[in-house]
Image (cartoon, rainbow, N blue to C red):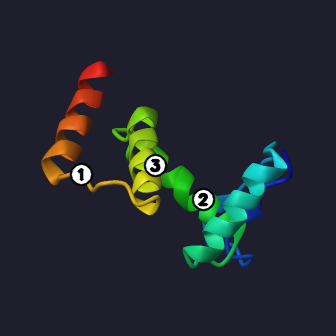
Amino acid sequence: MSNAESGGGDGSGPEMVQINLRLSEAFLEDIDATWREEGFNSRSEFLRYVARDAVKHPEFSREGWKSIATSEHELRSGAELVTREEVVELMDRNEDDE
């Protein structure tokens, strides 16, 4: 870990700490494409956002996200749409598994 830095450079923001993170090159390319597509200003801003979201909303389980990603892939692949009721049932079933 490096020395702590001020968030805004002028001491007015929250204390920011630099960390090191190891990722595969392919995953990093996916992250870079995503932050740009989503309109974030930088990779760091995007990673802070998703980390904050994961901490503030732990009710979104890994399995729930996998189901959402699978559904998104199926939608983009031209698969048949699912109903809202099917999604709610799937999410309820995932919560019961935990």
Question: Which numbered marker is on residue 65?
Answer: none
Inspect the image, locate mark 3, and give the three-letter code of the amino acid beneath it: Ala
Q: Residue at x 38, y 38 (%)?
A: 64
Q: Position of residue 34 (x, y in %)?
A: 62, 66
Q: Is residue 93 above or below residue 42?
A: above
Secondary structure state at the residue bearing disc 1: loop
Mark found first going from the N terminus, 2 or 3: 2
Mark found first going from the N terminus, 1 or 3: 3
Secondary structure state at the residue bearing disc 2: helix
What residue occupies the far right of the structure in this picture?
Answer: 2
Secondary structure state at the residue bearing disc 3: helix
Q: Nearer the viewer, residue 7 or 61?
A: 61
User: Circle 2 sits on which residue?
Assistant: 48
Instruction: Indicate which label's residue lies in the foreground, 1 or 2.
Output: 1
Inspect the image, locate mark 2, and give the three-letter code of the amino acid beneath it: Arg
Contact flag, marks 1 and 2 (Cβ < 8 Å): no
User: Circle 3 sits on which residue?
Assistant: 69
In the picture, measured across the screen, residue 18 lies left or right of residue 84, that is right
User: Circle 1 sits on which residue?
Assistant: 82
Contact flag, marks 1 and 3 (Cβ < 8 Å): no
Q: Nearer the viewer, residue 79 or 64?
A: 79
